Amino acid sequence: MSDAEATTSSCSKTRNPFTGAEANAVGVKVDHVFKSYGTAQVLKDVTFDVQPSEIFVLMGPSGSGKSVLLRHIAGLELPTKGKILVDGHDPSLEESRERVRVALVFQAGALFNSLSVYDNLALYPREHRSGDEKAIEQKVMHALKILSVEDAAKKFPSELSGGMKKRVSIARALVMEPQLLLYDEPTSELDPVMSATISEIIGTLKNEYSVTSLVVTHDRALALTISNRVGILMDGELISLGTKEELQASKDPRIVDFLNPKIDIQHPRFKQLENKATT
Amino acid sequence: MKQITAIIEGVGSVVQLMMRSLSYAGTLPRQWSRFIEQCYMIGYTTLPIVAILSFFIGTVLALEAGYAMQDFGAKEFIGSLVGLSMARELGPMMTSVLLAGRVGSAIAAELASMKVYQEIDALTTMNIPAAKILVLPRLAAVLVMMPVLIIIANIVGWFGGSVVARYVSYVGISPEAYFAALRHYTKFKDVINGMEKAEVFGFVVVLVCCDIGLNTRGGPREIGAAVTRAVVVSLILILVLDYFVTKILL
């Protein structure tokens, strides 16, 4: 099977949230990827596939290389060794981005601060000339409505709360009519209610529109709620790959510790902190 | 050796950015509003400070020339000296220095901040090249606005010289005599040469500041460092290019 076939499924289709039109769902192939910055090795021989229309969650502690890997899949960085294919194409090439629409929801939103929320969403269709201004307005307002932030259309990003920024960021990704949606820590810095809302939105996008989703998070609840499959990355190595049931049944002490963290208050580090606090 | 490599890399990066931006030149008509916005930023907001500076450059030139020439009885030539100096050298040079300080720093800060806060990455994932929507309108705007700024700088500078020539006692020549000498010795070609210089300086300043902004790495602290670097590199380049462009134009 060729690389292109490995990351495409003819039977799996995405449904455009705006027009209802169907398109082939895309898959991702991460093949023996290494990444180093100077002497620091951030990714070590990472290999996995994301199947078309599935929600794949990549978990791991802070600093394990999850976001770096996501940036590689979005085509923002190049691996030191190995290759990444999205629907059989190298995501870092401009012509690949024209063929496959990959949207990334950044951890901090990355909204354009000098543009209103409406213009943030309208930028992509305007630049890619997808419809006249009326069609763009309908598309933008529909995306804002899906995320329940239509009242924020005229506001600027600086006027939004963290949760609203996240939702606007997802709406902006949705306007791109993506075939692959990448989320970087979608629930970080959010309260539990907002986290639940975001996970519901991710699930809805998958169920309603069959968009392939790759979610990077260290939020265990989110991962176990929305995922079809979960990968665990630790110190740049993929130590586990499987369904959430397989993950929960795992006897690997690293996975058990990660999923059920125990705080040892007798640990010398805590003693040090306690002494500092008293003095 | 490291510094030489860094300079070569920097030149390569700037040339690449220029080629990429110019390859989108055909999209400029669709970016009309961005172009007008940049014309406003580069032209209109810089105009008052260019006018003030040029006026005082003209006055100082006339003062110095009047002082030096009074012993030779050549005060009638003050107009020609101020006229030529402003048109050929000081007008384009000082306007470009102001452009680097005011507009170049703002461009570097804005693009560096967009880079640090991942807005540039967001553009990349949306397949909207930064060279197309952020760099090209600025380059086009500076090419249009520099000649306008230079004409205004020259006129205001010449006028400043005439005020000193008329009212400072040891100079004391009439505006008619001052402008007659200026008209006689300052040719249209001199003004055009000055504009050509300014076009080169302005284009390079904007390009370098865009490149430095877009290549910023790290956190918010790097935004300040990028601004400083952009202004310093721009000023050095203006002075170095001044010699070579003058040599070519003479």
Image (cartoon, coloured by chain):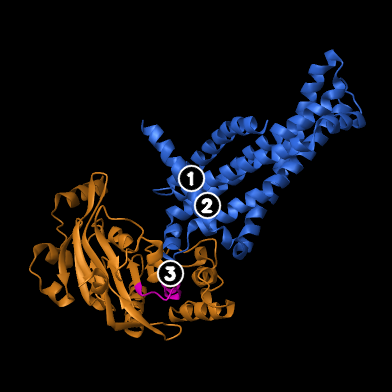
Chain colours: A orange, B blue
Q: Which mark is residue A206?
A: none
**Same-chain status of marks 1 and 2:** yes
Q: Are marks 3 and 1 in contact (CB under 8 Å)?
A: no
Q: Which residue corresponds to the image point at 86% horizontal and 29% vertical from the top-left?
A: B181
- x, y percent for residue B221: 43, 45
Which residue in the protein does label 2 denote?
B110
Amino acid type for the residue under numbered disc 3: Ser
Say if the magenta span includes residue A177. yes
Task: Return the chain for callout 1.
Answer: B
Which residue in the protein does label 3 denote?
A169
Q: Which residues are magenta?
A: A169-180
Amino acid type for the residue under numbered disc 1: Val
Counting the numbered discs, the total is 3
Q: Is residue A279 left or right of residue B55?
A: left
Instruction: Answer above or below: position of B87 versus A184.
Output: above
Q: Are marks 1 and 2 in contact (CB under 8 Å)?
A: no
Q: Which mark is residue B14?
A: 1
Cα–Cα span, label 3 and label 2: 21 Å
Task: Return the chain for callout 3.
Answer: A
